[in-house]
């Protein structure tokens, strides 16, 4: 069904997306159509992350798709960083526009304009906003979910009365929303770190990232959080009357994740048989399948479906006798459904059904009365197993080196941890010339640095998507 991962990883990735019916190419180069199977996964991801964002005290809002070009030009680094990716509208309604409109690549500028209107006093701060939306960045080398001209995401934008409050909020989101979501929900171990000056978001004073190792050992940036200092506040005059009676500029942050996470989910957990979904986030956790029609088979399958549903399991009943069982089983494997319960006349005659687990490929005859307990236990164990497998894979493919040359060589087949003092900005440029990037900077113990100038920092170098 799929090209083996070891033979051609990029082809395997595209095969899986197509044959699992996750997405298709859109009519405009670089765009994608997310099919119902793929969108159901995105909806689960969106719902869980949205709850975590709201738990952090953030409210959802919505801002326009079109942004006056002049807005982007107010912050020099921002417009310079995004200029190559912009889609610009110059005509509408049959006429040339007096000012070109940019299709949003991100919303710092338009949200900054309205923050300036809404913030008057220190009592209005912090202002914590999030938007679920689509954005457009003209992509020259598109790859479904990973790099597309249009993609779905969330973008948080906040304004604060102090630099310390802004920094703490950005780190709280990074740790308790992004890192926790990816670890606990997606079962993906990530490395939280600080981007180098070269890799910072355009207009930011600090960018934090969460990096994950894919199944081919390349790195994927799964999400970022940015401290914007007062750059955007000064450009858009986001100012407030302080408690002391003076007028001060706010400190702002932004942070975002996108459908890129779905691509990461595929590449971290997928195998040669298709997708493997972590049970906690799977839209369908269990598929009850009638193997072959027979006395009492449909009734037994329906009862198991009801019992599992009552137990809080997201379960689907597949009693399509007009579609061969083998084909249905292959489709369930491709789409990563964590557990199949196979109900057939032969097993049923002995009071059993077969529990097939997607993660380890095992098949276990199980008494009907024990199915609910066995399923709930297996779902919990398989969630942990996926995380443990991914963590062990990352550890096995990460090496400690001392020199830039050794780091570049090691990054051809995995990740390299090397002292940042042995790399520096000149070494970073040399690595970039060999298709290797500094993914992030961390302390020796793996924790997040407060500054890129701290002594003893470690750089993680890798090839990346």
Image: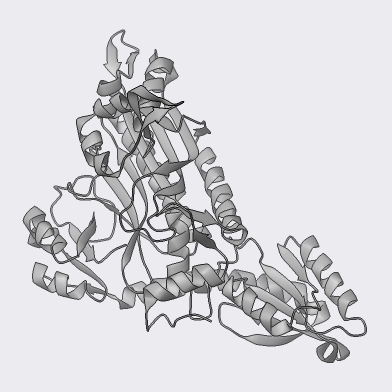
The answer to whether 41 is drawn above or below residue 165 in the figure is: below
Q: How many marks?
A: 0
* Quarter of image, res 291: bottom right
Q: Quadrant of residue 337?
A: bottom right
For residue 198, say whether it is visible: yes
Q: Where is residue 362 shown, x and y percent of the image?
A: 61, 85
What x and y, as percent, mark residue 38? 56, 60
Residue found 9% across the figure and 61% down from its top: 430
**Of 236 and 246, the residue lying toward us:** 236
Q: Is residue 33 left or right of residue 141?
A: right
Q: Nearer the viewer, residue 393 or 219?
A: 219
Residue 379, x across and y down, in percent: 63, 70
Instruction: Check the image and report above or below for 305 versus 93.
Output: below
Quadrant of image for the C terminus: bottom left
Residue 390 position in % (x across, y down): 42, 72
Residue extending farthest to the front is: 94
User: Left or right: 452 with respect to 277?
Assistant: left
């Amino acid at each position: 069904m799929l090209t083996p991962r070891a033979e051609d990883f990029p082809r395997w990735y595209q095969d899986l997306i197509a044959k699992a019916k996750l997405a298709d190419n859109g009519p405009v180069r670089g765009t994608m159509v997310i099919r119902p199977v793929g969108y159901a996964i995105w909806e689960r991801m969106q719902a869980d992350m949205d709850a975590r964002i709201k738990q952090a005290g953030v409210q959802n809002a919505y801002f326009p798709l079109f942004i006056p070009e002049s807005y982007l030009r107010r912050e020099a680094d921002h417009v310079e960083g995004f200029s190559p990716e912009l889609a610009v509208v110059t005509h509408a309604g049959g006429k040339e526009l007096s000012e070109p409109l940019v299709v949003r690549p991100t919303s710092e500028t338009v949200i900054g304009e309205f923050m300036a209107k809404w913030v008057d006093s220190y009592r209005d701060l912090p202002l914590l906003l999030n938007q679920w939306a689509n954005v457009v960045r003209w992509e020259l080398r598109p790859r479904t979910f990973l790099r597309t001209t249009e993609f779905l995401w969330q973008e948080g934008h906040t304004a604060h009365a102090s630099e310390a409050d802004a920094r703490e909020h950005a780190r709280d989101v990074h740790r308790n929303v992004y890192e926790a979501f990816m670890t606990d929900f997606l079962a993906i171990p990530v490395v939280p770190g600080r981007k180098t000056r070269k890799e910072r978001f355009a207009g930011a004073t600090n960018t934090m990232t969460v990096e994950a190792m894919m199944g081919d050992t390349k790195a994927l940036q799964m999400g970022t959080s940015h401290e914007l200092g007062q750059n955007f506040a000064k450009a858009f005059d986001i100012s407030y009357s302080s408690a002391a009676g003076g007028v001060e500029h706010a400190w702002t942050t932004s942070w975002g994740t996108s459908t890129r996470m779905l691509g990461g989910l595929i590449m971290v957990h997928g195998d040669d048989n298709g997708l493997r979904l972590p049970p906690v986030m799977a839209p369908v956790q269990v598929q009850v399948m009638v193997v072959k029609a027979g006395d009492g088979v449909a009734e037994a399958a329906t009862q198991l479906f009801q019992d599992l549903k009552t137990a809080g399991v997201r379960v689907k009943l597949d009693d399509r006798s007009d579609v061969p069982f083998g084909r249905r089983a292959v489709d369930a494997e491709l789409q990563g459904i964590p557990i199949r319960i196979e109900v057939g006349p032969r097993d049923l005659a002995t009071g059993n059904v077969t529990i097939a687990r997607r993660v380890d490929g095992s098949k276990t005859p199980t008494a009907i009365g024990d199915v609910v307990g066995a399923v709930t236990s297996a779902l919990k164990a398989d969630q942990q197993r996926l995380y443990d497998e991914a963590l062990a894979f990352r550890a096995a493919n990460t090496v400690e080196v001392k020199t830039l040359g050794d780091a570049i060589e090691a990054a051809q087949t995995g990740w390299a941890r090397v002292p940042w003092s042995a790399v520096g900005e000149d070494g970073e440029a040399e690595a970039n010339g060999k298709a290797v990037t500094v993914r992030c900077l961390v302390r020796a113990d793996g924790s997040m640095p407060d500054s890129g100038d701290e002594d003893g920092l470690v750089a993680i170098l890798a090839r990346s998507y």
